[in-house]
């Protein structure tokens, strides 16, 4: 039997855990909702239960288990802690130590555990088995309730010294813009994330409620919906072009809920990219839609396979 690693994908609404083999095949797996609570232990409890459930049938005596954890950020990879914006109970939460303790409780052996941000795991997953499996270097981008990113350079994750590199959603694309929740001005996320485009459309008189309705109306020709998506994708194009120019990358994979709208998103994004990606080495920048439904979980597994142990 090929080696299996444990993948843990932590988000604001759900926690997914699975055993994954070196071909990306899933063994035992489960998904639990992320509790809404101000108590850190209460929020961690379903993650611990999920790990126990997935490992219950794993044969004993197979040596230390390698574990990859992907989480909403910010993360502190050297410290093994996370402070997800969308999980208020966790600030400096020692997720690596807590998951390791549960794994050791079940298996009797201390595991080897790695941590990365969810955008990085998305990039790892799409690079390993998804839309970027044919390239050595790429940027992965998630456009949903926020804008997150990660990069694989020369087949290796580029996470930075703290684990928060390629934070594309918080690159300023308008130095005179309003202040973002992060403290900066005019960040990409303020214009391109789904809720921001919905709010901008509602301010212009649009009566829909969510990004799915917004993109559907844009596809049907609604002028307001098309206008705010145009603005959002221009901001996103500026952020992508800046990141690709700095990293010397020519392939970008875009996933997340907003990206599933298809050409109504990708056509203006690609068009505006031609205005920003103008240097010779990024002029042919290619934007591809993501193809994996569980890229974050598979990326956590890919991270685990790189660990020594």
Image (spheres, rainbow, N blue to C red):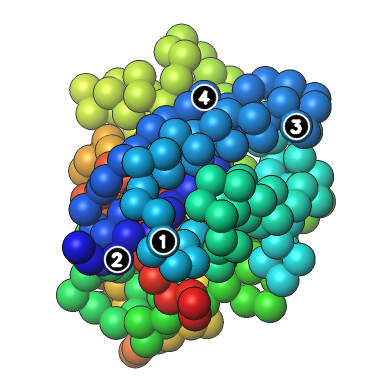
The numbered disc on residue 41 is 3
Residue 99's spot in the image, x, y percent? 62, 49
Q: CA distance from mark 4 to mark 3?
A: 14 Å
Query: Looking at the image, which residue sits at the far top?
Result: 207
Residue 132's spot in the image, x, y percent? 25, 68
Query: Looking at the image, which residue sits at the far front?
Result: 61
Indicate the secondary structure of the residue bearing disc 3. helix
**Residue beneath disc 4:** 33
Image depth: mark 2 or mark 3 in front = 2
Image depth: mark 4 or mark 3 in front = 3
Kindly indicate whether the residue at mark 3 contacts the one at mark 1 (C-beta within 8 angstroms). Answer: no
Indicate the secondary structure of the residue bearing disc 1. loop
Q: Up-down: is 33 above or below 22?
A: above
Q: CA distance from mark 1 to mark 3?
A: 30 Å
Q: Is residue 262 left or right of residue 113?
A: left
**Residue beneath disc 2:** 3
Q: Earlier in the sequence, mark 2 or mark 1?
A: 2
Screen quadrant of the N terminus: bottom left
Q: CA distance from mark 4 to mark 2?
A: 28 Å
Q: Nearer the viewer, residue 50 or 173?
A: 50
Q: Nearer the viewer, residue 31 or 28?
A: 28
Q: CA distance from mark 1 to mark 4?
A: 31 Å
Task: Identify the residue shown where x is 37% and y is 87%.
Answer: 154
Residue 290's spot in the image, x, y percent? 27, 52
Sort mark 1 into few (<14), some (14-19) or many (20+) by Cα contacts within 10 Å.
Answer: few
**Residue beneath disc 1:** 61
Image depth: mark 1 or mark 4 in front = 1
Q: Earlier in the sequence, mark 1 or mark 3?
A: 3
Q: CA distance from mark 2 to mark 1?
A: 13 Å
Q: CA distance from mark 2 to mark 3?
A: 31 Å
Image depth: mark 1 or mark 3 in front = 1
């Amino acid at each position: 039997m090929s080696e299996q690693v444990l993948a843990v994908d932590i988000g604001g609404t759900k926690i997914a855990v699975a055993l994954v083999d070196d071909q990306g095949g899933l063994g035992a797996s489960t998904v639990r909702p992320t509790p809404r609570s101000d108590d850190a232990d209460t929020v961690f409890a379903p993650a611990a239960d999920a790990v126990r459930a997935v490992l219950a049938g794993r044969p004993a005596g197979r040596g230390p288990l390698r574990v990859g954890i992907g989480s909403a950020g910010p993360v502190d990879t050297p410290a093994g802690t996370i402070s997800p914006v969308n999980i208020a109970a966790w600030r400096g939460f020692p997720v690596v130590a807590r998951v390791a303790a549960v794994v050791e409780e079940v298996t009797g052996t201390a595991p080897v555990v790695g941590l990365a941000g969810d955008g990085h795991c998305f990039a790892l997953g799409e690079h390993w088995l998804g839309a970027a499996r044919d390239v050595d270097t790429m940027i992965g981008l998630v456009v949903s309730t926020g804008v997150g990113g990660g990069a694989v350079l020369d087949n290796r994750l580029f996470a930075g010294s703290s684990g928060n590199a390629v934070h594309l959603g918080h690159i300023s694309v308008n130095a005179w813009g309003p202040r973002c929740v992060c403290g900066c001005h005019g960040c990409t996320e303020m214009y391109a994330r789904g809720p921001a485009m919905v709010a901008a459309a509602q301010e212009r008189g649009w009566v829909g409620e969510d990004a799915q309705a917004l993109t559907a109306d844009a596809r049907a020709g609604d002028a307001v919906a098309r206008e705010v998506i145009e603005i959002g994708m221009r901001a996103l194009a500026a952020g992508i072009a800046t990141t690709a120019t700095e990293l010397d990358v020519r392939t970008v994979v875009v996933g997340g809920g907003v990206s599933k709208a298809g050409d109504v998103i990708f056509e203006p994004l690609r068009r505006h990219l031609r205005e920003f990606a103008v240097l010779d080495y990024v002029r042919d920048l290619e934007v591809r839609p993501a193809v994996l439904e569980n890229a974050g979980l598979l990326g956590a597994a890919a991270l685990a396979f790189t660990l020594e142990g």
